Amino acid sequence: MSGTNGTPMNVTLRVWRQANASAKGEFVSYKAAGISSDASFLEMLDVVNEDLTVRGEEPIAFSHDCREGICGSCALMINGVAHGPVLGAATCQVHMRSFGDGDEITIEPWRASAFPVVKDLVVDRGSLDRIIAAGGFVTAPTGGARDANTQLIPKPDADMAMDAAACIGCGACVAACPNGSASLFTAAKVTHLGMLPQGQPERARRAVNMVTQMDLEGFGGCSLFGECQEACPKLISIDTITRMNRDYMRAMLTASPERSGGEG
C-alpha cells in the first residue's frame, strides 16, 4: 500500500501468533515497509499478509467484514488499547497516520476468558450472541409497519434507545475492562429495547435472563471502572449499566417478573 496517496512509512509489528485454541502462542515480529499513511490499519495487515503469502508463510489470521465500523468484527488490541489509539473508532477506521514512522506496534487478540482464541488474532465471541439470544428480542405483531406517529415516544427516551442501539457487539468493552465484564454490551441491548414501548412486555425477564446468561458465560463483574465506555467505538455511556441494574433489581424483587415488564 505504497501508492501516491499519503506518506510512505515503515513500522514493525509484534503480532500474536497462535495456531489454535490449545496451542501455545507467542509474539512474532514483522516488517511493514512502504505503507501509505492514508492506509487503514486492516489494509496494512492485508499488505503484510500478501507478503507472507508470496514468501510461502502462513498469513496472519484476523477477523474483518464490512470495514466501515458497523459489523464489529475487527476486534484487535493495538498497543494495549482496544481498537487502537483513535477515540470512538473501530480498528477498521484507524489509519496508519495515527502512528509514527518507525513505530513498533503490538497487536493482540481480545484477552478475556469468555473469548477463547481461535487462531492468531481471531477469538470466539459466541458468548455475546448467546446473551442476545437469552432476551434481546421483542414480541410484536407481524405485518406492515405502523405509522411512526401512532406511538409517541418522548425524545429523551428515543435518544437513549438510539444511542444504546449503536452497539456493534465488538467486545471492546470486555477487552478493556480489568474485570473482563460484558456489562456495557448487555446493558446496551437491555436499554435499547427497554426504552421503547415495543420492548415493555419482556422488559423485566429480559434483564434477568440476559444478566444471568452473561454470568453463565464467565464474564467478570462490573465495578464501574469506566474503561469500557472509553474503548467503545460508539462511545456508549455506562449510564446504560445503571438502567440495566435497576431493571434487574426491580425484576428480582417482583414475585412475578413476567407481569412486571410494563412498570417504570
Image: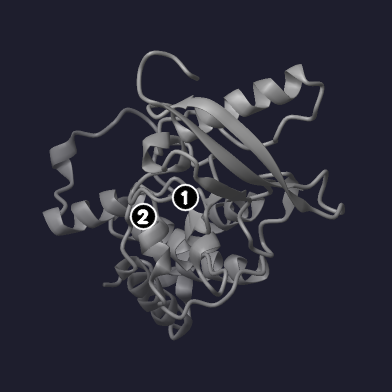
The spot of residue 192 in percent (x, y) is: 34, 55
Numbered mark located on residue 165 in the image: none
The spot of residue 121 in percent (x, y) is: 66, 45
Q: Which residue is mark 2?
A: 193
In the depicted view, which residue is nearer to us: 56 or 113?
Answer: 56
The spot of residue 129 in percent (x, y) is: 59, 50
Q: At x 46% / y 59%, what residue is drawn?
A: 185
Count every numbered label the image shows and give the total: 2
Q: Is residue 65 visible?
A: no
Q: Which residue is mark 1?
A: 137
Give the crowd class for mark 1: few <14, some 14-19, many >=20 residues within 10 Å: some
Q: At x 42% / y 81%, what residue is drawn?
A: 249
Q: Are marks 2 and 1 in contact (CB under 8 Å)?
A: yes
Q: Dot 1: what SS?
A: loop
State the colouring used for the structure image: one colour
Q: Dot 2: what SS?
A: helix
Above or below residue 214? Residue 130 is above
In the depicted view, which residue is nearer to us: 78 or 12?
Answer: 12
Amino acid found under the numbered disc labelled 2: Leu
Above or below residue 110? Residue 237 is below
